[in-house]
Image (spheres, coloured by chain):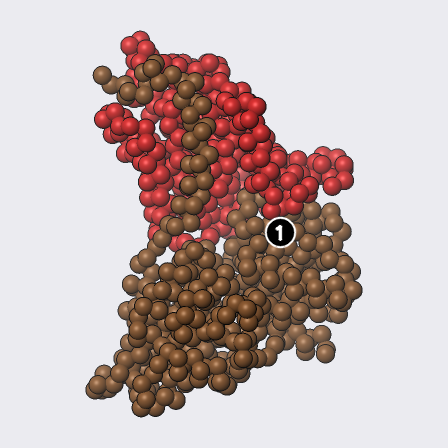
Amino acid sequence: MQPDEILDYLIPGIMLGALYAVIAIGYTLVYGVLQLINFAHSEVFMVGAYSALLALTWIDPSTNPTALVSVLLVAAGLAVSGTAGAATAFALEKVAYRPLRRRNAPRLAFLISAIGASYFLQNLAGKLFGRDSRALPTLFENKKVFSVFGTQVTILQLLIVCAAVLMMVGLDYLVNRTKLGSGIRAVAQDAETAGLMGVDIDKVISRTFIIGGFMGGIAGFLFGLHLQLSFTMGFLPGITAFAAAVVGGVGNIRGAMMGGMLLGIVESFSSPIFGESWRYVSAFAVLVLVLMFRPTGILGERLGRSA
Amino acid sequence: MRAPNFFYKGLGFAVLKRRVIKIALPIAAAALVLSACGSDDDGDKKKDGGSTAPGNSGGGNKPTWTIGFQAGLSGENAQLGINEENGARLAVEQANAKGDLPFTLKFKTSDDEASETKSVSAAQKLIDDSNVVAVIGPAFSGPTKAASPNYAKAKLATVSPSATNPSLTNPENNFTAFLRGAPNDNAQGGGMAKYLSKKLQVKKVFVVDDKTEYGVGLSKVAKDELTKAGVQVVSDSVPKATPDYGPISTKIKNSGADAMIYAGYYQDGAPFAKKLKEAGFNGPKFSGDGTNDAQFVSLAGDAANDWFLTCPCADANVEAATKQFTDDYKKRFNTNPSTYSAESFDIANLVIDQMKSFGAEKITREGMLTKLKGASYKGLTKTFKFKQNGEFDGATTFIYQVKGGKIGYMGDIDQLVGG
């Protein structure tokens, strides 16, 4: 790799990292309030992508949209996928986790319930939408917007990074500055005391799922634009994002953002340095290295205290 | 008490966090393994229905024999398997409808989801059915490699329309029941190399494989043949289901290669094509029969344009010999025949032909295997003959190019290059 090629790999890395970060936040938020790894989150991601596919193929039959139409289509995709993701996560919590919580089920039961819900959604999507890959309709011509030192940045890359940054800034504000945010932090710090102080724990948990699902759904749509859709599309990004959440410090929102970026960039650079087949080896080597020196992740704090 | 027990302070957060990290990695690994086992097993239930065609009821006590079929009929890259299934099914139905068979023919499918791990049990399903006298498939090289030892043990002949990895016929494998119904990847890789070096006269080619049995085999042959022709070769492997084809596309662009070859399937070829276009790589782009499917174009959209796709298969829709077949196929399945449909139809007829030659004798698996090995059958697409090791006898590669959203047929590479 030549020094002048660094940006060629850094920009796709940032894009992928931004996607991982947004998904990782979904894992981390839920972990923060429930100490539960929501393995079905990767399916929330997939549902977001497919809902956008359904909505957009229904709205748009034109193959060559104008700039204004493009903006509207992307906005519609974001809205639909976010809503569908939020709804799926909400239902998931109601169906797969709340009954277990009510009965004080052992932790292992939550994990099995999560994996079960994940398979259910995955195969339901496979049945409904077919097992073959699908592509989202062309929403815009993906040309370059500008170049940075000779490296082109495409509309899609810009869109993904902007959407991710906006969501992350919004979430940071929400968690640190609003009433719901202090509720989330309170539940994460000490659910029992929070309950005694008048925080409605069930409501807070449910809303946390909704926020994570909203971001996950949008990430699914953006990932679908970048690659394509299939009923198993959530699995690999989900596992990587989960790793990102762990690298950053599980339960820590800013940590999840950092972890996602780190893994995305490492994956991207592994291609020119080691070869493309070392992508996951490099990413997971970083995971192991970080955990060896900082067993609780880079930022290593829980949601409650990170604020 | 509403809060569940794990909120209690006794299970403090620090403990949980360390524990979660200890647990998380094995779980992630287990999930990876599990994900390979999700299954969809109603695939053949609904498909077995149409196996006995009408016009066959006067047969009295004719014996019933079954032709098995194994391919990926669901899951990723299922379209190729479905093309083949339809072709073979049509042949069986037509043979039954004619009414001159000394037996009633059934058709039994077994879905391996194009997966090596599931191939063995998919094969076992056919082996266990003593009525199955020969199998068409498996469609892909990886599943073929996994299932062939069992087929060999059962002496159940498999004729694959599309498992083109050269190593499958290595004598040391002992895949004694495997017959290849198509020229192998040596022919395709050689064809690509010939077209690139002689017709397009490129100087440097970037070869990418997808780490599958098929991709690695095809890319190796292409690389060897290109090097022999004096073309400089650079290569890399991109395992399938990579989340981002951006970096590899940039790498190809920056390598200064004039042309590229992707040895893999359409599922990943499509996003790759998109990213190559974005990266601004404008040289000729080649891929093999794994990508030669309308799905490639529908997934990749504009980015599929100008891709060259090779195939040991001629275009059934264009070639005059397959006109009748194309019409029948359209009538039966409401869609045009696609990659390997006609080849699969031919192979089914080859199998039926050998079954007929038993006459009044009882058909045995072993007998079928011997007869198939010695067969010479002129089908619609080509003449099927096999070498002693089960290799297809003959080597022709056809080339196609995507133009305006359609895969256009160009013809026989040898003829196009001129020698």
Residue in the foreground of this view, choosing between A60 and A223? A223
Residue B136 in sight from this viewpoint: no
Residue A283 visible in the current orientation: yes
Percent of width and height locating residue A14: 61, 33
Instruction: Please tell me which residue is depicted at 55% across the width and 26% down the height of the picture.
Output: A292
Task: Determine the chain carrying the residue at label 1.
Answer: B
Q: Position of residue B411 (x, y in %)?
A: 62, 75
Q: Where A218 falls versus B180 (above or below)? A: above
Foreground: B93 or B403?
B93
- The amino acid beneath tag 1 is Ser
In the image, taking residue A130 as reference, residue A15 lies left or right, namely right
* SS type, badge 1: strand
Give the chain letter for red: A
Q: Residue at x 60, y 38 (%)?
A: A282
Q: Position of residue A67 (x, y in %)?
A: 57, 41
User: Along the horizontal axis of the image, is B319 left or right of B326?
Assistant: right
Which picture quadrant has residue A28?
A: top left
Chain in brown (letter): B
Residue at image location 72% in from the left, 54% down from the top: B234
Residue at 65% x, 36% y: name it. Answer: A11
Label 1: which residue?
Answer: B237
Task: Tell me the crowding category of disc 1: few under 14, some 14 to 19, or many 20 or more residues within 10 angstroms, Cα based.
Answer: many
